[in-house]
């Protein structure tokens, strides 16, 4: 069974957004990174990982994508394709936290599947 465990928001100011979600909702900072595509701060409530992303080359602010923990990414990938979704790309090192396979649904909405989950997922 798939479980929703990851939501990514595109923000303009990582520090301000991180401070807001930590102060208001009591989320815990569990990681941060800088990649070629931009920077991210990762927060959690112990179940869901909230990724705050500052992406290079875009002014977009809002929900960027979401992710599900699944038992078997290969089997789920086949189900996704069978229902009209398509593989987009993979991120992270297989078998480690934050490793994900990105897909698009038939409307073009991006979502992730992962067997390992994201930083801060203690309730898989």
Image: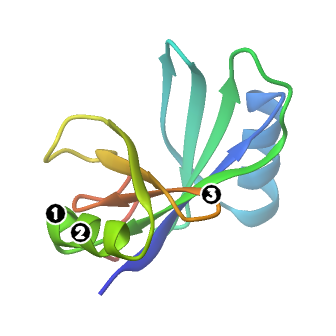
Mark 1–mark 3 CB contact (< 8 Å): no
Percent across and percent down for residue 110 are 56, 53
Q: Earlier in the sequence, mark 1 or mark 3?
A: 1
The residues bearing labels 1 and 3 have C-alpha atoms spaced at a distance of: 20 Å
Task: Quickly name the residue at label 2.
Answer: 78
The answer, for residue 112, to whether it is visible in the render is yes
Mark 2–mark 1 CB contact (< 8 Å): yes
Q: Secondary structure at mark 1?
A: helix
Vertical side of 11 occupied by 59: above or below: above
Task: Quickly name the residue at label 3.
Answer: 109
Task: Quickly name the residue at label 1.
Answer: 74
Percent across and percent down for residue 38 are 60, 19
Q: Quadrant of residue 81?
A: bottom left
Q: Residue at x 69, y 16 (%)?
A: 56
Percent across and percent down for residue 99 are 28, 45
Q: Earlier in the sequence, mark 3 or mark 2?
A: 2
The residues bearing labels 2 and 1 have C-alpha atoms spaced at a distance of: 6 Å
């Amino acid at each position: 069974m798939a479980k929703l465990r990851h939501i990514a928001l595109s923000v303009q100011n990582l520090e301000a957004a991180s401070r807001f979600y930590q102060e208001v909702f009591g989320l815990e900072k569990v990681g941060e990174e800088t990649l070629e595509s931009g920077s991210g701060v990762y927060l959690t409530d112990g179940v869901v990982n909230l990724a705050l992303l500052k992406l290079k080359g875009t002014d977009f602010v809002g929900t960027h994508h979401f992710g599900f923990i699944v038992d078997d990414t290969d089997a789920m990938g086949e189900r996704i394709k069978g229902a009209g979704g398509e593989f987009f790309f993979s991120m992270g090192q297989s078998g480690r936290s934050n490793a994900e396979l990105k897909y698009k649904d038939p409307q073009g909405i991006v979502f992730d599947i992962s067997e390992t989950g994201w930083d801060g997922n203690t309730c898989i």
